Image: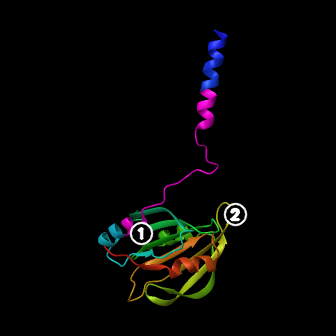
Amino acid sequence: MIYSMLAVLVVAFAWWSLMPNPDEPQRRPAEVEQAAGFAAREADWPIWSPVGLPETWSGTSVSYATIDGVPTWRMGWVSPQTEYVALRQTVDPPESWSGEVLRGLEQQGPVALQGPAGEQDWDVFTGVDRNGVPEVALVLAPTPDQPATTIVHGTADVPEIAVFVEALEVAEP
């Protein structure tokens, strides 16, 4: 009986040792292009989505859902330096919509960035999030060409977020 139990344990251990066990959890990239097309069909404003980002950027989440009572286009990315970058867009947001992202951040001044509507001044906000992690947010107020309020924020620094902003284009429905 002991020999048969040892034989079963050896076989089980051999089976377990052959199973892949990656050091990092593998995550399936988000279907950004497909979700952006859906959001572009549903939204009353031009939806922005990055095109041509290097493969070192990874989309982690996308959604088009109601947040604080307004339809919102959201997506999240991980940058090459493994920092988080997110985008939010909506039209006529309540203060709570942007307040959730900008809570605790202080306005620093504008930065000119090239985006889908040409070069525009984005308001820069910096600070730390609730966990003490440095965070940056770039806010673009509505314009005649782009009626949506757009916030790009995350743990990345301004130059890395600028790479993301400069890759944004109007999504095709």
Q: Is residue 6 above or below residue 127?
A: above
Q: Which residues are magenta?
A: 12-36
Q: What residue is pinned by disc 1?
A: 73
Amino acid found under the numbered disc labelled 2: Gly
x and y, in percent, of residue 37 in the image: 34, 70
Specify whether residue 136 is in view: yes
x and y, in percent, of residue 44 in the image: 31, 76
- Residue lying at the far right of the rendered structure: 132
Q: Residue at x 61, y 47 (%)?
A: 22
Q: Element at badge 1?
A: strand
Q: Is residue 83 above or below residue 92?
A: above
Going by the image, does 58 lie left or right of 108?
left
Q: What residue is pinned by disc 2?
A: 132
Amino acid found under the numbered disc labelled 1: Trp
- Residue lying at the far top of the rendered structure: 1
Q: Residue at x 51, y 82 (%)?
A: 166
Quadrant, the C terminus:
bottom left
x and y, in percent, of residue 54 in the image: 54, 73
Q: Residues within 10 Å of mark 1 (few under 14, many from 20)?
A: many
Q: Element at badge 2?
A: loop
Q: Residue at x 62, y 51 (%)?
A: 24
